[in-house]
Amino acid sequence: MLHIGVIGCGYWGPNLIRNFQIPQRSRVTMCADLDAGRLEHMRDLYPLLRATQDAREILEDPQIGAVAIATPVSTHHAIAMEALRAGKHVFVEKPLAQSSEQCMEMAAEASLRRRTLMVGHTFVYTAAVTKIRDLIAQGELGTIYYLNSTRVNLGVFQPDINVIWDLAPHDISIMNHILGCRPERVAAHGKSSVRPGIEDVAFIDLEYPSGVIANIHVSWLDPCKIRRTTVVGSRKMLVYDDVSALEKIRVYDKGVNVPPHYDNFGEFSLSYRFGDILTPRLDDSEPLKVECRHFVDCIESGQHPRSNSEEGLAVVRVLEAACDSLHREGKTVDIAYPVLET
Amino acid sequence: MLHIGVIGCGYWGPNLIRNFQIPQRSRVTMCADLDAGRLEHMRDLYPLLRATQDAREILEDPQIGAVAIATPVSTHHAIAMEALRAGKHVFVEKPLAQSSEQCMEMAAEASLRRRTLMVGHTFVYTAAVTKIRDLIAQGELGTIYYLNSTRVNLGVFQPDINVIWDLAPHDISIMNHILGCRPERVAAHGKSSVRPGIEDVAFIDLEYPSGVIANIHVSWLDPCKIRRTTVVGSRKMLVYDDVSALEKIRVYDKGVNVPPHYDNFGEFSLSYRFGDILTPRLDDSEPLKVECRHFVDCIESGQHPRSNSEEGLAVVRVLEAACDSLHREGKTVDIAYPVLET
Amino acid sequence: MLHIGVIGCGYWGPNLIRNFQIPQRSRVTMCADLDAGRLEHMRDLYPLLRATQDAREILEDPQIGAVAIATPVSTHHAIAMEALRAGKHVFVEKPLAQSSEQCMEMAAEASLRRRTLMVGHTFVYTAAVTKIRDLIAQGELGTIYYLNSTRVNLGVFQPDINVIWDLAPHDISIMNHILGCRPERVAAHGKSSVRPGIEDVAFIDLEYPSGVIANIHVSWLDPCKIRRTTVVGSRKMLVYDDVSALEKIRVYDKGVNVPPHYDNFGEFSLSYRFGDILTPRLDDSEPLKVECRHFVDCIESGQHPRSNSEEGLAVVRVLEAACDSLHREGKTVDIAYPVLET
Amino acid sequence: MLHIGVIGCGYWGPNLIRNFQIPQRSRVTMCADLDAGRLEHMRDLYPLLRATQDAREILEDPQIGAVAIATPVSTHHAIAMEALRAGKHVFVEKPLAQSSEQCMEMAAEASLRRRTLMVGHTFVYTAAVTKIRDLIAQGELGTIYYLNSTRVNLGVFQPDINVIWDLAPHDISIMNHILGCRPERVAAHGKSSVRPGIEDVAFIDLEYPSGVIANIHVSWLDPCKIRRTTVVGSRKMLVYDDVSALEKIRVYDKGVNVPPHYDNFGEFSLSYRFGDILTPRLDDSEPLKVECRHFVDCIESGQHPRSNSEEGLAVVRVLEAACDSLHREGKTVDIAYPVLET
């Protein structure tokens, strides 16, 4: 039985506690938060849970084998490093850290200590994203032309990060996962409408290998809640609407038939294909549950998590580059990915 | 009774013919198209209409006072110039011409000849866009923070222009009209997925005066037909869904209450406002009918059309700058607007 | 070339005129209406059309081989009888007539004169209804349990008929067609909200053979336009939404798995099946065009129309019985179908 | 601090337990269920809760002042009677009991013992239903013409009751509450598609005083989850969509203008009104929370609950009459309401 400590009991913490209660395999025995009110609330929900304002108590408890960190991003690195040094396996909410340097340090420490380090890219554990990845891998959509993703609503302003760091990790991790590769260049435009210096709306343009392009629109200032990704391929097109309860994915048998050979000077004759729409049935397991079990699996088996530190670093590199572009008037920025020693 | 000749009888031509039949005021007496089949079709629809393959016949007919041009964009300038020189008033489908130089020549010729030159920015004649302009002008939405617009579907590839020139004139003319100003800078990203050299998807970032930003997504390769513009203001937010038959505009009494004074070092306390949603009843006149009448009004009164050559030029300048950016890897490009002599 | 006269140029007449212009096969040469304004409008639309206030002129024209009747229901019988006696083939808008007696007389006259008599049950000529009929016939939905249909909006009050006679012919003709049988019993409830004596909302319960039940909700007083029919079968379920432009049919692979044998005293164990949703691509021909061509086909070939007088009579019998029930406090009424002599 | 025992820990029980934990006012100290597995689950969720298979332990515990019953309907009466006799206040899930006789006995017992007896008509505690009731009471909708309600999905078959008893209590309690009166007559049609003798789909026609009619469609066999009630008034129309998270109510300023005086023999001239649509902001408290607090309030103050035994009885009377009609081929049945002695 793996004992887990949860550090950070805000919005996401209670969900982690609930999902890390895995019969016969793991349970959360301690939680920490600076806010006494939140601890009170956690004790009400889980009377047997030890709750403390000092996260160090968790790190020092020899019975605790793993730590889940759901604190503000600016603290991820420090807490994770301490936890790794204390010999714990570590799960960190997305994004993995505030900078790629921090990510690399964390990855190196985990590697040195032979501990599992996993980042909470929850969407890569959803049935919908898995389905999209499979459809692409099987060639069902044909050659991928482009993707675009909208993740907006009237959302909570984060105190320490802008809307790109808050919301875009979801879109980037989804896109990286379903395409099986990483963007090479990025440009971003945005604005700080409400709070000076903290962008609350942004539009991000990505270039993936093979000329696949992607656009991501994130906003804390939209009247509608939209979580919608479109994948356009040469054979089929797909819409992933995460807000829909029962019809998250729609596969459109639509496309343009391009003649195989054509004369540049002559007529370029295209025909359009309009076919059926399929909404595949998806497994409705809670993604966080799948994710939490995967973390425990990886600790037990020693395998690398699907959302390992390399994936976490890759996302952070894109975030850094996007913000770099944003502050340079949308200049297109190349993204280099450091190689992790493992 | 104004006699009008329509040049170009493709998709849009028949709609112009129908809407320029204004009892007591104007009628279409001739139409021209290079395609004999289309002319046959026009004769079937309007047995009394003279149909010709030679547009010159229209220009040389002294009874014809005005010409409406719905031909491919690459021919707008040549035909319009001939028509103006022949003393006709001229209505040109959007975009006004292929370049700002062409637009300026056309405007100068119209000015010289004292003829009305109007471009078919149809959306500025819709009840929805008029309503949005009014709401913004009255301060109902507060300070405008940003706009974003999506205009996509599995659309017809144009032979001579890319998707920006085909679809974005709508969004740019709408935004210019409702904001009452013009973008100062633009960056664009896109891709030629199907036909080399002709972009079929693009994402355009605009900066308007006072820091208002806007993003436009246009595509001929999307499985869904979407025509949706969001306007986010400090007091209210608005969604304009042109695909909806009866609920084109929704005004959301949503926003973030920012404290009037705040201490940069202290806590920045925001509160959120969630209120009613209002879908105002809109007049359902056909916009093209309003537009055609406006053209006839302007000819009669001598007033400048709402979508005059200056507006047409302004849109073309943005299109040029956007394509310039697109071909320079998304570099942000400043947009200068030449002054028209009138 | 079949010459056709259209009697009644209100809302529906112009559509008939347009769709009966079939190259090489039929054209509308005359139209009649009591309202001089409507005739003026028809002449504007079709300058070569002869327009008259006296329908007799059409019936007496020996060149005219067929007549299409789109007048108020109360006049269907008289006009159709005169037309049949004048030797014309006859197309009548739904419902066929005001009573089953009238329908039988019309059918007898058509049979005697060897003329085609067809009723405008337009929906049985749609790709959607044909698809549903095929899916049911192929057993794709399994055993049909029940249907329900909603046909409501803020609609035009008819001067001479209630909402059942106005709207329910669509639902009844659709249900009869897709099930391939006719209801045996009916009960109806409704109300005259606005105009005394003319019901503007009604709920109709039907029993088809084999215990299939159906409910129809019709209203001229609903804020939303809804045209939606649900077909529930033991294997799959289907929703037909006629308001949707592109997704009229959705087939749900949903159902309840019933154990084949079970012990009444023991546990009755059901399991649920949730599968894919399929939106089949449908041909988007205009149904009225298909219908008009079918009428001309039947005249040429002598075959019975899909919506022949027997189908027209069957629908009128249900309407009569429904109104009978409505005026007897919803009492369930048996429906007998007279046998037509042909 | 009121101690509450919850009897029945199936689907609904855990929600009751959670919502009856009201700081300083009430807490659930015991729960009972026949199923040991459910009790195990409850102990996992609430480690401090005493869980028993014998409900009598709850009734015999002198510390427990109130009992909430969420067992199958067939057991409501027996358990409630025992609880009342044991001096407990009683909350019963809807419907109150299996027959009006049972309801009357329960009401009499509660009255005799001076105990609060409340039925879980949850929807009358929602912000949406309260808003509709207010709009009607204020005359905002004008004279009410009719209502119709659809409550369908692929739902769980209840072992002891049909779909009318399972789902229609919601619609009837909502309609009674918003209209402030009770139906006088009912007719119902339905079918047992899957399980012999247990109707899984039904259509219910109600007549309220002043000629208001209503139709309710309930089904366990529909592919879509629909919870939608339309209220049509002479001034405005309203749609209540309980499935929508954020736009539960839409008020349509639509209607028919009827001339105040008219000549029966002359023309009856109607005009249509199409106006704005308003989606009022609603408080998003959990209705069950409001309901549970109301129960505790009533116990403390002695006031009658909004959903008291008289309302519970009224709903059961309609259910009985509807099933009576269903088994008499849809015959319209008068509904008499016994007077409760209180």
Image (cartoon, coloured by chain):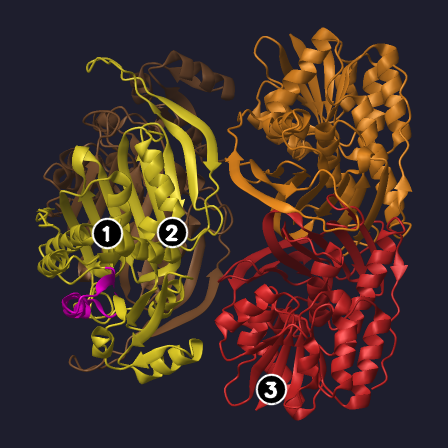
Chain colours: A yellow, B brown, C orange, D red
**Image point (67%, 54%), residue name:** D150
Of badges 2 and 3, nearer the viewer stands: 3
The percent position of residue C332, horizontal first and vertical second, equals 89, 45
Neighbours of disc 2 within 10 Å: few (<14), some (14-19), many (20+) = many
The percent position of residue C68, horizontal first and vertical second, equals 72, 22
Range covered by the magenta-colored residues: A68-94
In screen coordinates, is B315 left or right of C78? Answer: left
For the residues beneath circles 1 and 2, the answer to whether they share a chain is: no
- Residue B13, labelled with which disc? none
> Amino acid under label 2?
Val
> Amino acid under label 1?
Gly
Q: Chain of mark 2?
A: B
- Residue A302, labelled with which disc? 1
Q: Is residue A307 above or below residue A77?
A: above
**Image point (65%, 35%), residue name:** C11
Give the alpha-carbon distance from disc 1 to disc 3, as whole Å: 49 Å
For the residues beneath circles 2 and 3, the answer to whether they share a chain is: no
Give the alpha-carbon distance from disc 1 to disc 2, as whole Å: 60 Å
SS under mark 3: strand
- Residue D3, labelled with which disc? 3
> Amino acid under label 3?
His
